[in-house]
Image (cartoon, rainbow, N blue to C red):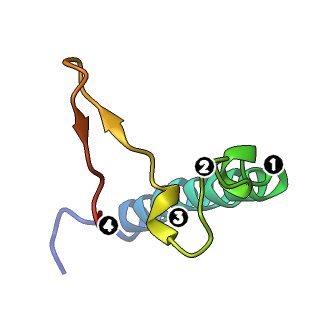
Amino acid sequence: MTPFLTARAALGSLVVFCAVYAFIFIFGVFYIYRLLRAGPEGRLILPPADAVPNRPMSVVHKIKDLTGSHQLSAGE
């Protein structure tokens, strides 16, 4: 045992530690619950109009840079 660490100080530190982590855990559970209740956005459920069923990579949006040139997405 160290001479400057009392049982009261250790207990107080443990109580504060547990309170802080309990708050973080409860907030995280509440936040995840709200995300699950909201559900996914519409764009995550519906495929794009130009999607082709036999080409899975057709759902990946193509990126255009500021010059207007066309860049292919990964896998194309």
Q: Which of marks 3 and 1 is nearer the N terminus?
A: 3
Please state the horizontal and vertical placement of residue 11, each as a whole percent of the image. 45, 67
- Badge 3 element: helix
- Can you identify the residue that label 4 sits on? 6
How crowded pointer 3 is (Cα within 10 Å; few <14, some 14-19, many 20+) is rated as few
At label 2, the amino acid type is Asp
Query: Contact (CB < 8 A) between labels 3 and 4?
Result: no
Q: Which residue sits furthest top?
A: 66
Query: Contact (CB < 8 A) between labels 2 and 3?
Result: no
Name the residue: 68% across, 51% down: 31
Please state the horizontal and vertical placement of residue 76, each as a whole percent of the image. 29, 63
Q: Which of 52 and 13 is in front in this view?
A: 52
At label 1, the amino acid type is Ala
Q: Which residue sits furthest right?
A: 37
- Can you identify the residue that label 3 sits on? 18
- Examine the image and state in which quarter residue 33 appears: bottom right
Q: Earlier in the sequence, mark 3 or mark 4?
A: 4
